[in-house]
Structure formats: C-alpha cells, structure tokens
Amino acid sequence: MTMIFGIPVQAFLGQLLVGLINGSFYAMLSLGLAVIFGMLKIINFAHGAQYMFGAFVGFLLLQWLNIGYWPALILAPLVVGVVGMAIERTMLSRLYSLDPLYGLLFTFGLALVIEGVFRYYYGVSGQPYAAPQALAGGTNLGFMFLPNYRGWVVFSSLVICLGTWLAIEKTRLGAYLRAATENPKLVQAFGVNVPVLLTLTYGLGSALAGLAGILAAPVYQVSPLMGSDLIIVVFAVVVVGGMGSILGAIVTGYVLGLAEGLTKVFYPEASNIVIFVIMAVVLLIRPAGLFGRDA
C-alpha cells in the first residue's frame, strides 16, 4: 500500500478532498463577508443565517413547489439577495452613521431571529436534500474515488469566487462600488445613486451566502444550526485574510480548509482549533491580516 508520511495515500488524499470542500464553503462565505465589510463597513453577523436561509429556500422550493436543484440554484440566491436588500434599505442603512458596533449588534440579533424562526418550525434535526441526478455517483481517479457532487462544489466555488473578484476589481461597476465607499459625496456629485449601490452590495453579499447554502444542502443536512456552526470559523478566515480584502478571503478560505483537512490526518484532536491557532499567530505577526492594509 502506498504511504505518504506513514499514512495510506487514500486516507491522506481523502482528507485533502474534505479540506478542499470545506475550504470552498469557507471561501464563498468569507467572500460575501469581505464584500459587505469592504464596501459598507458592516460586520455582518447574520451571514451564517443567510447561508442557512439559502439552503432552506432550496429545500422549501422542493417540498412546496417540487422545484429541483438546478432552478433552486438560481432562485435561492435571488430570494436571499432580495430579502437582504430589503433589510439593508429599511433597517441597516440607518446605522451607517453610527459606531460599527451597532451594525454588529443588529446583525447578531437578526441572525438569532432568523435561526429561531426556523428552529420553531423545523427543530434542530437536519432535513435531507438529495443531490441532482446528473451529479450522482462518482469518478474513480485511480488513487481515490471522487464523488461527482463534491467535484461540482469545488469547481463552482472557484468560478464564483474568481468571477466576483473580477467583477469588483476589474469592471466599471466595481470601480463605482469602491469609490462610493471611499468618498460617497464625490461619487454622488457625478450622478451615481450611492444608496442604491450600497443596497445592491449588501444584496450581493447576502446572495453569495444563499448560493453557498444551496450548494451545501446536498453535502450537509439542511438544519437551522448549519449557519451558526460555521460563521465563527468564517469570521476567523476573514480576519486571517484581512478584513475587507476580497482576494484575501478567497485565498485564505481554501488554504485554511486544506490546513484543517491535513490536521485531521496528522493530529485529529487539533482539527477543530487549528484555524483559530493560525488566526492567533497571524494576528500576532501581522494584525491587519495576510492581505489586509494597516489602518
């Protein structure tokens, strides 16, 4: 049997795959958090609840309207994004002029409300959500068996993260968004509707969370607790990458996912804390994060 560092190659690569899948969700969720914080300076603690909401939208569309996975992949992020824009326009926008702590407290309370509503109706047990038939089964790579849906998750995450980064960093709309956060009065003087841009930005971040949720639904059971179990880890990823750094959120998400997977191979007892240990070390060496800028 082929060994890597004294460990069977199948076990080693299998944990790497698990780490890459987890890293795909970390990257998508931390990307949404970085977009919202970078553009709105809001620490969106409701992001985990929006991730859970996206998974439940797909589940409810299947249960109530018999809408399958592929249409739900489009509809779920749209629903979460529209709800997010309504929240930003009616409530969150009133907090921009206040201390950022108010935004954190509001989104934390909002997360508790959303989670509480779903716990009331569905309890804490998970609901199964089947992968689409087109992605059933797996592919034998010779050294390991790769489930097709897991491969789809990794591919989708890479495309979504790269596309979002390019849209914000390389397009005119992205330039407007960045300028609106740096000097909103000047941008508004050029005829750009800054409040609408900010609403769209929060909607985009929320939609990214919803998209991660519907992608996660067939991998993990749909549960009201799935967001709260993940959001603390995602915040750690964002801090390591640098608050507001979109590229940092993406790269760090994948790297820390792989680090977590490798830790499960060599020292399983530390796999639940390795991301937080890395965060502590990075903050001691570089307080702004790996890709962040010092204030």
Image (tube, rainbow, N blue to C red):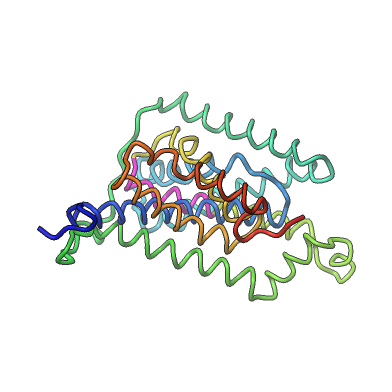
Quadrant in which the C terminus appears = bottom right
Q: Position of residue 39 (x, y in %)?
A: 71, 57
Give the residues drawn in magenta, as a range: 208-220
Taking the spot 40% from the left edge, 35% from the top edge, the residue there is 223
Q: Quadrant of residue 271?
A: top left
Instruction: Give coordinates of residue 269: x percent, y percent.
Output: 34, 36
Q: Quadrant of residue 268?
A: top left
Residue 10 sits above or below residue 109 on the image: below
What percent of the width, then of the height, locates residue 288? 67, 53
Q: How many numbered circles does the render carry?
A: 0
Whether 177 is among the magenta residues is no
Q: Determine the residue located farthest toward the left in the rendered image.
A: 1
Tell me the quadrant of the picture where the N terminus can be found.
bottom left
Q: Which residue shows up at 84% across the image and 44% down it?
A: 97
Residue at image point 39% right, 50% down: 22
Most common SS among magenta residues: helix
69 vs 65, nearest the viewer: 69
Q: Quadrant of residue 10?
A: bottom left
Instruction: Depth check: give the residue in front, 246 or 190.
Output: 246
Image side of residue 177 versus residue 212, left or right: right
Pick the residue in front: 228 or 190.
228
Q: Is residue 240 left or right of residue 76?
A: right
Image location (x, y in percent) of residue 131: 28, 52
Tell whether position 213 is magenta. Answer: yes
